[in-house]
Image (spheres, coloured by chain):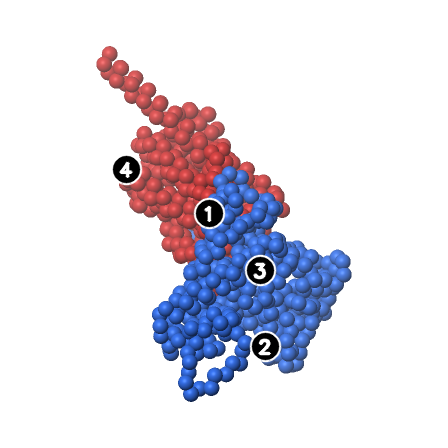
């Protein structure tokens, strides 16, 4: 396998579109439960913890971009082979592909569950899962540029939901956020770890990087995308904390949707129906990007067409959806993926980039030694 | 080849969307009975009686509403049993009002509220109320003469009073919020039948989910001032005439009649701002500072209001009177161990370290002391002096 990937000029996309990719792939199915999950660990300081998690993410993104800049135009799979050799590198890549498929799975399963609980209690899981997978497969068939378009539309089309979140502020009790910073370091770190399910997704920059046209500007746009996510998450968590009572927030499963129940328009009694439906637009780029990245890995490692990879992954994920039946099982799987995400998206890229940097540094030193000798 | 595949996929996708959308549960309006109000009574131990007001859309039906009463142990079984007694499928998406009998409310209503929370079809803005007598009596009242169904009537009754700022918002959301907060207790309005009509007669104070006390009349006004910023609301106060001797105008020519033994002032509150502050953490001393801007609406005797000093005098007297009343009210809350104002929240907000539980706060609440300061400004006296 070649380390560097040189796609055709017509397949590249502009660097500023990374804003939409990063933001749309981060915001997904995790954010509807984010305030509660972090609140359980850190109580009313959750919004500060979420903000810190966003800052941490931006540091990790810096690590990733520095690593990618060591190469001409390499992606994650290529770097693996370059650093660890063919066998170990491909083995690690394979593990990462499984993680990506698991993310893909968790996203559409969680969304299906939300739809089942809020709108159609009798809807069988496979029906919605089938449509979502088919939609993702269709988009991924179009290639990376179509996916970029999907994420652009997703961000633009759902931006207004942020404005709706200000309605619950009318019922807020601001005493809830005091005393500020009442959390100890241990719980804070735990809280940051719990944000992983919502914040992860940014690791996909390592896969789309070869397709960016102006690579030297990638870092800037990636950071802007992450900044926007951090801002949104902090806002959502803050509003949830002042809106819900202490015991209330730890009881609800999807605080963001429960919060939108209070919104009432004159001709629309229940706003959360709209929100849940629109959420499909939010998760669609996630599905597409995860499916794209994993199928790309498939074609890079096994040297078959990417289309074959898409279908195999889609069928595997669809088949797996029959094994999860109850809420507690779904919870277990989601927790597992969230934990895996913490290591795969937060920890591993940092380690890898340090290894890459050391390797390149040693190589350079060797070269100069050879020259001087 | 690629193009053909694309078309096949598109076709497959659209046919999926069309076919699968038929699988969702159908809900035709004519075949639905929308429950607009639900009432719960305590029948005997372990048994509740549920009454439901159903709004129908059948154009041929004479009565647009139907009332069904059944007994069961849980609220969802009630719904099932009620479903057996009607030709339409009962749905609760349009539920406006829930009535609990006082008997039930004294025992605790959280399990019934929990059922409302758990059901995604029920909105967050449903009003919860308590009734003096039985919920079923209110709901069975005078079926023929009703032009709109009871649920909508109650909804309008409460909404109108909340909007004119006479009542705290009694929505499901607000109840949950207060119930789940460690330093705050729920408050719900009390319904009563008067001359064949349902009226609001007071406010029930809850300790957790149990009614322990009631507030009537004037005290609701003070509760409202203490609880949140509010913009309007009238309040009447009686004073001994001797205190106002200087102010009462001697009107020559007019015969001076005394209808009342006391002098009554009616004050309209335009704006109020309440700050509850913990001043002494150790001794649990709270400062309650209230700033009122009010308007003199009515005085039962002609007062000389042209003189600024006189207005100042009234301001002071009224302020003092309010201080007294508010202090009395706060002590009443303390005695009943209810905290509808959220003093506990204020205490928790200033207390670092481990968060207080509800019980810990209740133990502390006994020893809380209040300093009440009312600053009353009469900004207008109407169109005449």
Per the model, the C-alpha gap separating discs 2 and 4 is 68 Å
Measured in 3D between alpha carbons, the distance from the residue under mark 4 to the one under mark 3, in whole angstroms, is 61 Å
Q: Are marks 3 and 2 on the same chain?
A: yes
Which one is closest to the eye, mark 1 or mark 4? 1
Chain letter, colour red: A
The residue at 54%/42% (across/down) is B355
Identity of the residue drawn at 59% across and 79% down:
B147
Q: Are marks 2 and 1 in contact (CB under 8 Å)?
A: no
The image shows residue B220 at horizontal and vertical percentages of 54, 65
Q: CA distance from mark 3 to mark 1?
A: 26 Å
Give residue B187's mark: 3
The image quarter in which residue B315 lies: bottom left
* Foreground disc of the pair 2, 1: 1
Answer yes or no: is residue B217 visible: yes
Q: Relative to B203, say whether A366 is above or below.
A: above
| Cα gap from disc 1 to disc 4, whole angstroms | 57 Å
Task: Pick whichever of labels 3 and 2 is earlier in the sequence.
Answer: 2
Where disc 3 sits, the SS reads: strand
Q: Secondary structure at mark 1?
A: strand
Q: Which mark is residue B279?
A: 1
Circle 3 crowding by C-alpha within 10 Å: few under 14, some 14–19, many from 20: many
* Chain appearing in blue on the rendered image: B
The residue labelled by disc 4 is A216
Disc 2 to disc 1, how far (Cα)? 52 Å
Q: Which residue is mark 2?
A: B148
The residue that appears at 23% across and 14% down in the rendered structure is: A372
């Amino acid at each position: 396998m070649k380390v560097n990937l040189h796609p055709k000029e017509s397949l590249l996309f502009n660097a500023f579109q990374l804003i939409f990719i990063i933001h749309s792939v981060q915001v997904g199915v995790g954010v509807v439960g984010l305030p509660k999950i972090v609140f359980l660990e850190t109580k009313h300081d959750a919004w500060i913890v979420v903000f810190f998690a966003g800052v941490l993410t931006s540091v990790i993104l810096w690590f990733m971009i520095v690593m990618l800049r060591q190469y001409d135009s390499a992606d994650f799979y290529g770097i693996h082979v370059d650093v660890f050799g063919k066998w170990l590198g491909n083995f690690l890549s394979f593990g990462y592909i499984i993680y990506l498929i698991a993310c893909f799975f968790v996203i559409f399963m969680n969304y299906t569950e939300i739809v089942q609980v809020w709108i159609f209690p009798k809807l069988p899981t496979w029906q919605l899962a089938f449509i979502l997978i088919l939609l993702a497969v269709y988009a991924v068939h179009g290639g990376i540029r179509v996916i970029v378009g999907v994420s652009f539309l997703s961000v633009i089309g759902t931006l207004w939901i942020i404005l709706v979140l200000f309605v619950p502020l009318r019922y807020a009790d601001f005493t809830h956020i005091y005393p500020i910073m009442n959390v100890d370091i241990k719980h804070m770190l735990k809280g940051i770890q719990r944000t992983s399910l919502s914040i992860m997704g940014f690791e996909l920059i390592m896969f789309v990087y070869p397709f960016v046209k102006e690579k030297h500007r990638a870092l800037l746009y990636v950071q802007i995308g992450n900044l926007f996510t951090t801002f949104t998450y902090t806002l959502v968590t803050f509003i949830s904390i002042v809106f819900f009572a202490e015991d209330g927030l730890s009881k609800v499963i999807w605080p963001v949707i429960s919060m939108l129940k209070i919104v009432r328009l004159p001709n629309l009694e229940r706003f959360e129906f709209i929100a849940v439906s629109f959420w499909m637009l939010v998760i669609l780029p996630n599905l597409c990007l995860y499916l794209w990245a994993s199928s790309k890995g498939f074609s890079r490692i096994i040297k078959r067409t990417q289309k074959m990879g898409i279908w195999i992954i889609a069928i595997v994920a669809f088949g797996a959806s029959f094994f999860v039946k109850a809420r507690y099982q779904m919870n277990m799987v989601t927790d597992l993926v969230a934990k895996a995400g913490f290591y795969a998206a937060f920890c591993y890229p940092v380690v890898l980039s340090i290894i890459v940097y050391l390797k390149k540094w040693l190589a350079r030193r060797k070269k100069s030694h050879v020259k001087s000798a | 080849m690629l193009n053909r595949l694309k078309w096949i996929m598109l076709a497959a996708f659209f046919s999926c969307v069309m076919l699968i959308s038929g699988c969702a549960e159908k809900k035709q309006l004519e075949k639905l009975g929308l429950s607009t109000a639900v009432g719960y009574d305590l029948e005997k131990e372990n048994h509740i009686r549920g009454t439901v007001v159903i709004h129908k859309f059948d154009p041929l039906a004479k009565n647009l509403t139907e009332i069904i009463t059944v007994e069961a142990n849980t609220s969802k079984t009630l719904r099932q049993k009620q479903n057996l007694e009607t030709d339409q499928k009962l749905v609760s998406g349009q539920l406006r009002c829930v009535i609990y009998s006082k008997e039930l409310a004294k025992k605790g209503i959280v399990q019934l509220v929990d059922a409302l929370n758990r059901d995604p079809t029920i909105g967050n803005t449903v009003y919860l109320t308590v009734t003096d007598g039985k919920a079923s009596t209110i709901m069975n009242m005078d079926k023929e003469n009703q032009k709109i169904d009871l649920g909508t009537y109650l909804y309008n009754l409460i909404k109108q009073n909340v909007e004119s700022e006479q009542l705290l918002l009694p929505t499901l959301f607000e109840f949950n919020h207060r119930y789940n907060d460690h330093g705050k207790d729920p408050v719900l309005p009390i319904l009563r039948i008067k001359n064949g009509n349902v009226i609001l007669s007071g406010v029930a104070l809850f300790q957790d989910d149990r009614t322990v006390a009631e507030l009537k009349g004037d005290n609701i006004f003070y509760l409202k001032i203490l609880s949140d910023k509010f913009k309007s609301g009238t309040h009447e106060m009686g004073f001994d005439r001797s205190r106002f001797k200087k102010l009462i105008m001697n009107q020559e020519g007019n015969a001076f009649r005394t209808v009342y033994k006391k002098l009554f002032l009616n004050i309209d509150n335009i704006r109020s701002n309440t700050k509850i502050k913990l001043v002494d953490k150790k001794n649990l001393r709270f400062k309650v500072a209230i700033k009122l801007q009010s308007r003199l609406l009515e005085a039962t005797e002609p007062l000389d209001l042209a003189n600024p000093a006189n207005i100042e005098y009234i301001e002071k007297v009224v302020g003092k009177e309010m201080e007294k009343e508010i202090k009395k009210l706060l002590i009443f809350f303390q005695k009943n161990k209810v905290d509808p104002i959220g003093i506990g929240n204020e205490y928790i907000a200033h207390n670092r370290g481990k968060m207080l539980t509800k019980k810990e706060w209740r133990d502390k609440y006994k020893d809380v002391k209040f300093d009440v300061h009312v600053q009353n400004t009469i900004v207008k006296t109407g169109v005449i002096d």
